[in-house]
Image: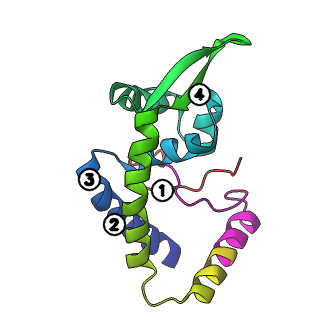
Amino acid sequence: MLLAVLGRASTRLFTEALRPTGLKPRHLAALTELRAAPLTQQVLGEVTGTDPTKLVGLLNDLERWQLIARRRDPGDRRRHIVELSPAGHERLAEVDRLVVATEERILAGLDAGQRGALRVLLDQIAVNGRVATGCVAVAAVSEDDGDDFTLPPRR
């Protein structure tokens, strides 16, 4: 229950921190996954743990705000490739500062060694509990209430 309580509290803090940007944690999860490389829409949904029907609305938001671009996969016209736009990269860099500040608030009182140990332990819990293949810095929205974090599998 401690992890559940801390997860809800962390979600509230991240949601509050993101509010001035207009983004929600689920938007940030998708943008963060796209930072490294474009993904198919299906893979993006899988790695963020977002239901395909909810993913479409999420991507519509991000596209309307010009933070992503969607295009047909030239190798399979049935699939869409999703990638960060230049504006998406800029917004993500701005939001990174909010994420760091929020993590600092959550982890206040822990030194660098304790923070590293916590990350290792959380990763071990995720893997051993088979809830994910590992921890990620920002995770996606769960299916039940729209703004809770879940731990998607690592790519």
Span of residues in magenta: 121-140
Secondary structure under the numbered disc 4 in the rendered image: helix
Secondary structure under the numbered disc 3 in the rendered image: helix
Q: Look at 64% across and 80% down and name the residue there.
A: 116
Disc with the residue nearer the chain's start (2 vs 3): 2
Visible residue check, residue 1: no
Under mark 1, the amino acid is Phe
- Read off the residue under disc 3: 19
- Read off the residue under disc 2: 13
Label pair 4/2, CB-CB below 8 angstroms = no
Q: Which mark is residue 149?
A: 1
Q: Is residue 88 above or below residue 20?
A: above
Under mark 2, the amino acid is Leu
Q: Which percent across, then down, holds residue 109?
A: 45, 90
- Read off the residue under disc 4: 41
Q: Which mark is residue 104?
A: none
Q: Look at 67% across and 58% down and name the residue there.
A: 131
Magenta stretch: dominant SS? loop
